[in-house]
Amino acid sequence: MQITFWGVRGSYPVPGAATVRYGGQTSCVEARAAAGDCIIVDAGTGLRALGGKLARESGGQPMHYHLLLSHVHWDHIQGLPFFEPAYIPGTQISIYSPVTAADELQQVIGGITRHEFFPMPLEAVPASFQFHQVEPGNDFSIGAFRVMPIALNHPYGSVGYRMDRDGSSWAYVSDTAPFTQVLHKQHFLSGPEPLTDDDRTSLGAMREALVRRLEGVDTVVYDTHFLPDEYARFPHYGHSTPDQALEICVEAKVRRLVLYHHAPGHGDDQMDQIAAMYLARGAGLGVEVLTSFEGMTLPIGPEPDAGSERKRERTLPG
Ligand SMILES: [Zn+2]
Ligand SMILES: [Zn+2]
């Protein structure tokens, strides 16, 4: 299995001279098995170029595509109306999302293609769509891929995915804040509300379930939108820092962490600094830390041996 990054930004696209090397498109990753079949994770503006590639690969023939959505914030769905295979008659597109019901997801996707916003409404698009609701804890299969949805801490919720295939595994953990605040209770103006005991219990359980789900995974792609000083200013935006991601990955004995969902304001030079800083910090903790860029392809290694001494020797970040 291998993964390719088609969009690595959070919030909104940032094309321009400052983002030439890391890229300016929003969230979209392609997971591809050696057999050639693939799953798409998130449909940010990076999906447009991926759709072009998939349409060329199919030679214009209709195929069945599978798209997992973490949630339906703009930066995770905006590429969908520009997905070229959707305009090939006979194409089937299965969309999986944590939206509360499949019919609600249809309304969301149909909503962004309403005639006021887009020239072609969803009903007129040649492809046929199937909408599936995912629930953390309810694992499912797409062909030979095993998909495990994981609850994340984000305003109105978000879902991460662990994906296993042919003895290798990776996980997509975006968007999420650390597990210290209940984000649906936050208000941008009033700030955080005090946590109740129930809040603490449910956040702790969510964090524990995430760590358990990531245990032994080869590669974890994680929302590391903020640097620590930025996070301190915007703790209620629903995103993490590389340090918070490292803490989770060390606990789960993950081999490799990939920084992802970069803040739109972090230009190439700053991204170089972030990449170098966290590569070194991760090395000290036994985690390989890579920084995603548009066009990056990573082979996903075999699931590490659970009894490996090297894994056990890791310590938590201080
Ligand atoms: Zn996002
Ligand atoms: Zn979001």
Image (cartoon, helix red, strand yellow):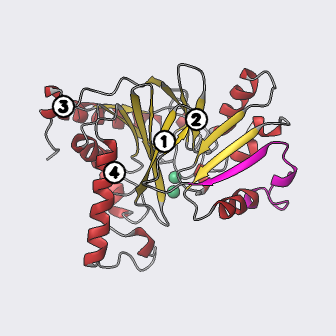
Q: Which residue is drawn at 27% across and 62% down?
A: 204
Residue closer to the observer: 213 or 79? 213
Q: Do the residues labelled 2 and 1 touch (CB within 8 Å)?
A: yes
* Foreground label between 4 and 1: 1
Which residues, given as a range, are shown in magenta?
111-133
* Distance CA(mark 4)–CA(mark 2): 21 Å
Residue 202's quadrant in the figure? bottom left
Looking at the image, residue 29 lies above or below residue 181 = above
Q: Residue at x 67, y 44 (%)?
A: 94
Q: Residue at x 72, y 63 (%)?
A: 107
Residue at image mark 4: 210
Q: Do the residues labelled 3 and 2 touch (CB within 8 Å)?
A: no
Q: Residue at x 41, y 34 (%)?
A: 170
Helix, strand or loop under label 1: strand
Cβ of mark 2 under 8 A from ligand 1: no
What type is the residue that disc 1 sits on? Val
Residue at image mark 3: 311
Q: Of callouts 3 and 4, which one flags the residue occurring earlier in the amino acid sequence?
A: 4
Q: Are marks 4 and 2 in contact (CB under 8 Å)?
A: no
* Distance CA(mark 3)–CA(mark 2): 29 Å
Residue at image mark 1: 147
Q: Of callouts 1 and 3, which one flags the residue occurring earlier in the amino acid sequence?
A: 1
Q: Of callouts 4 and 2, which one flags the residue occurring earlier in the amino acid sequence?
A: 2
Looking at the image, residue 89 lies above or below residue 53 = below
* Distance CA(mark 1)–CA(mark 3): 24 Å
Residue closer to the observer: 159 or 52? 159
